[in-house]
């Protein structure tokens, strides 16, 4: 069989040359022939925009790629067919991508912050210009999750997404569970090993996960969900004792990004949650990510893989580049995101969830009845109560059935006010059941 | 925002009206408006070809769909824009799909047997006609695996695929492990519950998994792999004892479909294998499926979900229909499969694997040394040996390092010939480490 003839080369511009950018540049070069045959045309990397050309870069400095470095990003994006943005941050990434789209280029971006804040502006601009915007690498790194949600489930209805979308916090929780360590110790360890940033706050406070939750929710529910719509709670309040109790009750603690369709609209939140050990998400270890999707017809799906790192992220970028490039060669266009269903986005207080409340109570008869009465008064029903005496005080673990978050909050407040209750030790939501 | 205007309706023909077909017809009808907005044109179901119109069908008989039933599949496929084939079997499915393609229709099929036997003929015909052929539902039901391999990993290189792609056998192995039951008992139970066919041989003999392995391998390695290229071994030889030993050594037994790129070519095989309990595939329970992919840049990925059933399979079919329909409205075409890399397809004897050999030996000094010497003579190296006395005989469990399958086969034969060896109890390959 003779090789199919190739069309004229496509001009590819790369914005950013950090860990991901240099890997993308390398893959474009080393897989040049294979990419050309998959696309139907060669992909010519015509420039790599950086802030400072002279800075040394692993994998680039001293190679043929070095000659492609330029500080003139504005000119570069205007002469490209496909613009890959892996520089991060809101500006100048936003302006450069809009300029690229306006001049007719298709764009591929890994920029979760930009998409969570202003994705719909980009999608609408791309639709108007008739070009593609792809962003598989922005959520869960190498894991193909955007494409399945946008395309494979296009004839189905997504009901709920539960995601472990931050590798740093998953690593931290995993180590706390396996070693019985406290959070501070593990965060320090993760920093030493390079799994956590010097300033880990975007990870441990849940903001990185929240940006990804906003993007996933927007796609899954065809609704504009931005970062401010996401209720966020990080892992800083978790103790070794919480994790140990979880294990004792057949559960693990995970930081979950949750996006759900309810009867009234969409609720999106990020917080630590208890997950049964038998749930597929419970087995996601170390710095891996996974996204669990419940769809009306498809049922339960899970997508698992590396959520970060130069090569995994570059793989996702390249997959998008091939799709965008094929559309330029063969005609066609990727999914259109601007036709929004626009479901109402509800506050997290309206989410349906369950909680496991651990309470130190005085060890005397009638305590359980008092607590149960207070819970019932708030319209919340109890699924299970466990009692464990610990010296003078007794430890009560109350797990509720599903109820609205605001009712559960009021219930916990009321429990704090009971005379025989010494202390509410912890309140953790239970998900995945 | 005003709703985008819709193009002229696309004519959709459905071949087959069993569990999947009736679900597809129902989804096309109930989600009509949403599908139209995603596609940019309404999808009109114009006919459902069946062998016998008068047979009662759940979800169809007595509804508006009943009027669409026809026995004239030949005419139906020639007047459609998109043909969905969920009738199964080789003929007349093959002829009908080729006729549809020849008359310019795009096709969506869930027919794994046909694709494993003659997929390349369909792909080539579709490429020539400039139409799409999509088949997400043919492998692992609702799990989006074809699309990620074809598209998301298009800029990466797949090294290996390990799949649990047959739900019946996974259910059987899972129950054997959890209940300590023998295979026959669990198969009978699965038949009672409807998880296994009255004749379960295609499942338990591994042939269903082999068809899916051939399709996955073809896509992942851009190489024609047909059913005859797949070395198949079912689960019938497994005993409750094998499963119990696996558990004792921190492993589970899974029926795996394995497709790998080696230095010399591609090897594709289906057989039971020991998988470490910590491997993501080990947590795949019941009738669920999962496909674990190792790619050069992306690293380890896993895709998990329901591998069968009317609604899950229909969800995958609908996702494909939306993609094919969008191409007809907006222009463009799905991935082209006829540009094959054509790597050599090697026999399974050349696969690199490890084995765990359980041997009953006479309980006297020097036995271990004799066995070790025989293994070494065959160029195979031992990773671990465990010894457990069982009354008069001792039980030896030898786990090898990776070696070629043919060398391992010869090693096992030679072990059988050792004078102090009473019996080779079982030989199981070890994968996923």
Image: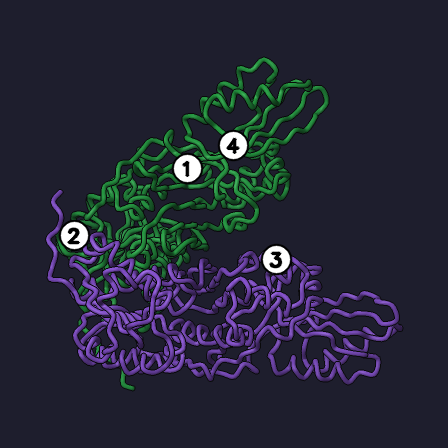
Chain colours: A green, B purple
Position of B184 with respect to B125 (left or right) is right
Q: State which quarter of the image contains the N terminus of chain B.
A: top left
**Mark 3 → mark 2, Cα distance in angstroms:** 47 Å
In the foreground, A237 or B167: B167
The residue tagged 4 is: A400
Q: Image point 39% across, 40% down: which residue?
A: A208
Direction from residue A39 to residue B433 in the image, left or right: right
Tell which tag, 1 or 4, sits nearer the viewer: 4
**Badge 1 is on which residue?**
A270
Label 4, label 3: how far apart the Cα atoms are = 32 Å
Q: Earlier in the sequence, mark 2 or mark 4?
A: 2
Judging depth in this view, the residue of B271 and A369 nearest the camera is: A369
Q: Describe the element under mark 4 as helix, strand or loop.
A: strand
Residue of label 3: B277
Q: Chain of mark 1?
A: A
Calculate the distance from the C-alpha at mark 2 to the C-alpha at mark 4: 46 Å
Please check whether the numbered discs 2 and 1 fall on a single chain: yes
Label 1 sits on a secondary structure element that is strand
> Is residue A319 visible in the rendered structure shown here?
no
- In the figure, A61 relative to A30: above or below? above
Reading the image, the residue beneath label 2 is A127
């Amino acid at each position: 069989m003779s090789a199919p003839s190739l069309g004229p080369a496509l001009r590819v511009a790369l914005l950013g040359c950090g860990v991901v950018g240099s890997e993308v540049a390398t893959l474009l070069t080393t897989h040049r022939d294979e990419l050309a045959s998959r696309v139907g045309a060669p992909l010519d990397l015509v420039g790599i925009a950086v802030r400072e050309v002279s800075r040394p870069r692993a994998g680039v400095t001293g190679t043929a790629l070095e000659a492609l470095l330029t500080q003139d990003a504005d000119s570069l994006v205007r002469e490209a067919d496909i613009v890959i943005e892996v520089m991060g941050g809101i500006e100048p990434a936003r302006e450069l991508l809009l300029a690229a789209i306006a001049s007719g280029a298709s764009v591929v971006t890994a920029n979760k912050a930009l998409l969570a804040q202003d994705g719909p502006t980009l999608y609408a601009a791309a639709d108007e210009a008739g070009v593609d915007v792809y962003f598989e690498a922005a959520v869960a790194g190498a894991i193909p999750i955007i494409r399945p949600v946008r395309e494979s489930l296009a004839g189905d209805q997504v009901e709920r997404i539960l995601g472990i979308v931050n590798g740093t916090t998953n690593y931290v929780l995993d180590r706390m569970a396996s070693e019985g360590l406290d959070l501070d110790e593990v965060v320090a360890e993760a920093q030493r090993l390079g799994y956590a940033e010097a300033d880990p706050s975007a990870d441990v406070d849940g903001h990185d996960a929240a940006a990804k939750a906003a993007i996933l929710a927007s796609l899954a529910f065809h609704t504009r969900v931005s970062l401010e719509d996401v209720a966020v709670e990080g892992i800083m309040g978790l103790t070794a004792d919480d994790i140990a109790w979880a294990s004792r009750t057949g559960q693990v603690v995970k930081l979950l990004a949750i996006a759900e369709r309810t009867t009234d609209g969409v609720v999106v939140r990020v917080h630590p949650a208890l997950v049964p050990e038998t749930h597929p998400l419970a087995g996601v270890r170390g710095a891996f990510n996974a996204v669990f999707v419940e769809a009306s017809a498809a049922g339960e799906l899970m997508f698992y893989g590396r959520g970060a790192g130069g090569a995994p992220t570059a793989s996702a970028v390249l997959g998008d580049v091939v799709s965008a490039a094929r559309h330029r060669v063969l005609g066609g266009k990727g999914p259109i995101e601007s036709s929004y269903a626009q479901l109402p986005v509800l506050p997290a207080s309206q989410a349906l969830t369950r909680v496991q409340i651990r309470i130190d109570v005085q060890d005397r008869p009638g305590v359980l009845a008092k607590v149960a009465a207070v819970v019932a008064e708030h319209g919340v029903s109890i699924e299970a109560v466990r009692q464990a005496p610990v010296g003078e005080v007794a430890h009560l673990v109350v797990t509720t059935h599903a109820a609205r978050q605001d009712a559960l909050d009021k219930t916990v407040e009321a429990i704090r006010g009971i005379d025989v209750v010494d202390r509410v030790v912890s309140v953790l939501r239970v998900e995945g059941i």
